[in-house]
């Protein structure tokens, strides 16, 4: 039977980053149930890196991921992982309170936030409809991420250090024996001293297969779709636009716009499918702030964003079973926090000091521990 130091369960961005950071120091196996890595949430994201999006903890993890994405290790990627995008919130006079909150959060995280009048916002994004909003605020640090290049970079780097990646292998059972876990998958049996539960929406289900109580993680569906803008618009430099109430957003995406209702519909863990009604509501809301009708949806999809009760991620050992490491509940931020969270998990698993980028953010392990959710 094959033996590993660490078996990572889940071939999304979370598992790939942990494997990447562990591989130089340990014998690592990554198992993915689907025939391809990145099939679920990771392959369905809006690919935005925004240090001003999410809870304060998410913002710190995002900031700590920035240096890696700006300057990845040699050989990680043949192209930049980040390209400038910008993230513009628009609101009405009745929503001025949100603008104050955005300023306060930007100050707390020492991030730039450029206030714009509605006219200035329309000068940047001419399709915005006059009179449909009163103010805008632009996070100039927001970037587009190349999600596939990141995922492949983490996996290539892992393999380069001897890690094995097996797709089409669902973890069916996990049994703790003496000093290791006995892992049974679709076609393999193996031993690993540590298992990392990076199975996204299935994290509680995978824990149950190890006879570990759930953390109460809930997957929420979010829908996205592409539509065209009228010819003659150069949308390449437009920022992502989100309304102050987070009732919709849209952003340039390979020559089209990617729109979303920004909804959170509780779901079971599954191969998430878009809901036509969610698409229709999003189209209606977006049409209220743009000056053309959306005539055709080119493609619609949805994915799951999995949250804990306090909406912050979990990365830490399970206290009731040795060698079981939770790495999940990364909600809508799993790409933009991936490098820092993966490095953090590897440090915990290898019993190494807190990585410098996270020390700078004042991170303490209790903030991410599973115990806080029990
Ligand atoms: C519409 C949408 C927009 C988003 N936009 C952004 C964004 O702009 N920026 C951002 O940072 N994040 C965004 N996100 C969130 C981001 O996509 C997720 O946080 C991230 O992909 C989570 O990664 P993961 O590896 O935890 O999960 P996943 O990518 O779902 O990976 C988990 C993997 O585990 C596998 N698995 C499950 N059970 C087993 C088992 N028993 N055995 C083996 N394998 C198993 C699954 O098949 C799956 O591939 C968005 C999400 C959605 C849906």
Image: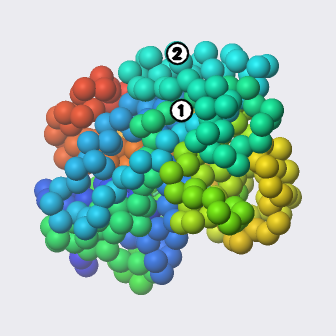
Q: Do tag 1 and tag 2 residues touch (Cβ < 8 Å)? A: no
Q: Residues within 10 Å of mark 2 (few under 14, many from 20)?
A: few
Q: Check the image and report above or below for 17 versus 50.
A: below
How far across and down, in percent of the image, does residue 12 sit?
44, 62
How far across and down, in percent of the image, does residue 158 sit?
23, 66
Q: Is residue 285 left or right of residue 203?
A: right
Q: Check the image and report above or below for 68 versus 171.
A: above
Which residue occupies the foreground of this view, 40 or 59? 59
How far across and down, in percent of the image, does residue 266 sit?
73, 49
Q: Which residue shows up at 38% across the image and 21% down it?
A: 110
Which residue occupies the foreground of this view, 360 or 51? 51
Q: Which residue shows up at 42% across the image and 55% down it?
A: 145
The residue where tag 2 is placed is 104
Please state, as top left, top right, bottom left or bottom right, where the N terminus lies in the image. bottom left
Q: Which residue shows up at 24% across the image and 34% down it?
A: 357
Task: Tell me the quarter of the picture where residue 11 sits.
Answer: bottom left
Residue 280 seen in this snapshot: yes
The residue where tag 1 is placed is 138
Q: Is residue 223 left or right of residue 251?
A: right
Tag 1 secondary structure = strand
Q: Is residue 149 left or right of residue 107?
A: left
Query: Any atom of ligand 1 within 8 Å of the CB at mark 1?
Result: no
Q: Check the image and report above or below for 34 versus 284.
A: below
Task: Tell me the quarter of the picture where residue 359 sits.
Answer: top left
Q: Nearer the viewer, mark 1 or mark 2?
A: 1
Q: Is residue 59 left or right of residue 154?
A: right
How far across and down, in percent of the image, does residue 339 sit?
32, 48
Q: Residues within 10 Å of mark 1 (few under 14, many from 20)?
A: many
Q: Earlier in the sequence, mark 1 or mark 2?
A: 2
Q: Which residue shows up at 31% across the image and 26% down it?
A: 361
Which residue occupies the foreground of this view, 22 or 145? 145
Using the numbered discs, state the Cα–Cα distance from disc 1 to disc 2 in whole angstroms: 14 Å
């Amino acid at each position: 039977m094959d033996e590993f130091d660490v078996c990572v369960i889940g071939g999304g961005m979370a598992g790939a980053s942990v494997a990447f950071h562990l591989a130089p120091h340990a014998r690592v196996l990554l198992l993915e149930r689907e025939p391809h890595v990145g099939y679920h949430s990771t392959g369905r994201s809006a690919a935005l890196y925004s240090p001003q999006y999410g809870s304060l903890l998410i913002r710190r993890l995002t900031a700590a991921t920035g240096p890696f994405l700006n300057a990845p290790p040699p050989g990680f990627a043949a192209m930049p992982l980040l390209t400038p995008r910008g993230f513009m919130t628009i609101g009405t006079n009745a929503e001025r309170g949100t603008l104050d909150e955005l300023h306060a959060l930007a100050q707390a995280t020492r991030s730039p936030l450029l206030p714009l009048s509605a006219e200035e916002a329309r000068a940047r994004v001419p399709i915005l409809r006059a009179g449909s909003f009163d103010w805008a605020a632009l996070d100039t640090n927001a970037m587009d991420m190349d999600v596939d290049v990141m995922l492949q970079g983490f996996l290539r780097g892992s393999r380069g250090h001897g890690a094995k990646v097996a797709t089409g292998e669902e973890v069916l059972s996990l049994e703790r024996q003496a000093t290791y876990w006995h892992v049974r998958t679709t076609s393999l049996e193996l031993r690993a001293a540590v298992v990392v539960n990076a199975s996204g929406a299935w994290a509680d289900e995978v824990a149950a297969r190890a006879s570990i109580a759930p953390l109460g993680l809930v997957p929420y569906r979010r829908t996205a779709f592409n539509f065209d803008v009228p010819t003659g618009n150069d949308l390449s430099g437009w920022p992502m636009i989100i309304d102050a109430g987070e009732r919709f957003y849209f952003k340039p995406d390979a020559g089209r716009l990617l729109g979303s209702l920004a909804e959170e519909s509780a779901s079971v863990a599954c191969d998430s499918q878009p809901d036509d009604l969610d698409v229709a509501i999003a189209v209606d809301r977006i049409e209220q702030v743009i000056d053309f009708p959306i005539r055709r949806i080119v493609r619609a999809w949805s994915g799951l964003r999995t949250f804990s009760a306090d909406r912050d991620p979990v990365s830490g050992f399970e206290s009731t079973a040795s060698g079981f490491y939770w790495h999940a509940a990364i909600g809508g931020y799993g790409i933009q926090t991936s490098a820092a969270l993966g490095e953090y998990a590897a440090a915990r698993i290898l019993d190494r000091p807190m990585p410098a980028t996270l020390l700078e953010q004042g991170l303490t392990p209790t903030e991410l521990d599973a115990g806080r959710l029990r």
